[in-house]
Image: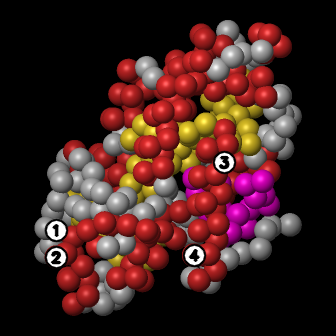
Amino acid sequence: MPRRFAALGIALLSLVPFQPRPAAAQSFPDRPIRIVVPINPGGGTDIFARVLQEIVGSSLGQPIIVENRPGASGTIGVQHVIDSRPDGHTLGFIWNTPITAAPHTLGARYTIDQMAPVFTVGYSPFALCAKPDFPARSLPEMIAKIRENPNTYTWGNEGLGGVMHLGVERILRRLDLQMTTVPFQGAGQTLPAFLGGHITFYGGSIVGAMPAIRANSARCLLLTTREGHPAAPDGAGLDSLGLGDMAVTIWWGMIAPVGIPADRMARLNEAFGAAMRTPRFREAMDAQGATLAPLFGDEMGRAMRAEYEALGEVARTLGLSRPPAR
């Protein structure tokens, strides 16, 4: 998925300003636009949404309101967006767990067919990070140490049944690495537990680990993208293990209720596409260790579906599938 983002996203971004805007779209929006963020303030998802709010508000001629609706691993906020009137005035800025994993593992009452893809902004690798005093300074050394001590170490993740948990668990099983999984409710809990010595490895996005990386309190050795990452010079990606086909990332994007008129969707893509080209937004992505790689409309939809189907298979293999909540 990361290569697809990188290959298609920049090209599509350059085309957005040249899409013709129908005259009917001139009156849209006619009232404030709400961007629902299905997580608490402060994390990468919330930060990116608020930077877009800051940039786009003036170009659309109406205020943009960011509304945090956390709960149930993001599914409460996503359900609210899905149930909203499809007029373009209610959108959801999300990360991928409530979209491509939650319908399989968390009892969400929706599927990806009940939401309209608007655009993605980019992605970041997940990582397994050790403290500087852990007796391994490279990915091969870390793998060897875990194999020598099965079921000795613990790794925290950002939520049972999320994209990170499913993706990394599949990698660990392929490598025959036996550790105890400790689920938390987001990086805001995982990172303090790691820094406090309650778990051996931080498991989560590079975005969530950046404070510890900058403070030299974490050494990220396993990256879940094909290649490594500049923020983790000691680490390596999955291509180094011959597991590039298992690459998985956290990515962010905008969804909407199904049924928004095409001219309004084009207006949104035009405004937000322009925002993503600004130095201000690129700086925000860089500061969080994220890679700018936008996809729009159908391209985003195809990428979503591919991940949704792949994670459904992983959830069934791991015995984590749950029926939708009633």
Per the image, the residue denoted by label 4 is 314
Q: Quick check: can you spot residue 13?
A: yes
Per the image, the residue denoted by label 3 is 301
Q: Which numbered tag is attached to residue 138? A: 1
Asked if labels 2 and 1 touch by Cβ distance under 8 angstroms, the answer is yes
Give the number of the mark in front: 4 or 2.
4
Per the rendered image, the range of residues in magenta is 96-113
User: Could you tell me which residue is drawn at 45 percent across and 34 percent down?
Assistant: 10
Relative to residue 317, is residue 221 depicted above or below?
above
Asked if labels 4 and 3 touch by Cβ distance under 8 angstroms, the answer is no
Q: In the rendered structure, which amino acid carries the disc numbered 1?
A: Ser
Name the N-terminal-most of marks 2 and 3.
2
Q: In the rendered structure, which amino acid carries the disc numbered 3?
A: Gly
Per the image, the residue denoted by label 2 is 141
Q: Which numbered tag is attached to residue 53? A: none
User: Could you tell me which residue is drawn at 20 percent across and 82 percent down?
Assistant: 145
Asked if labels 3 and 2 touch by Cβ distance under 8 angstroms, the answer is no
Cα–Cα gap, marks 3 and 4: 20 Å
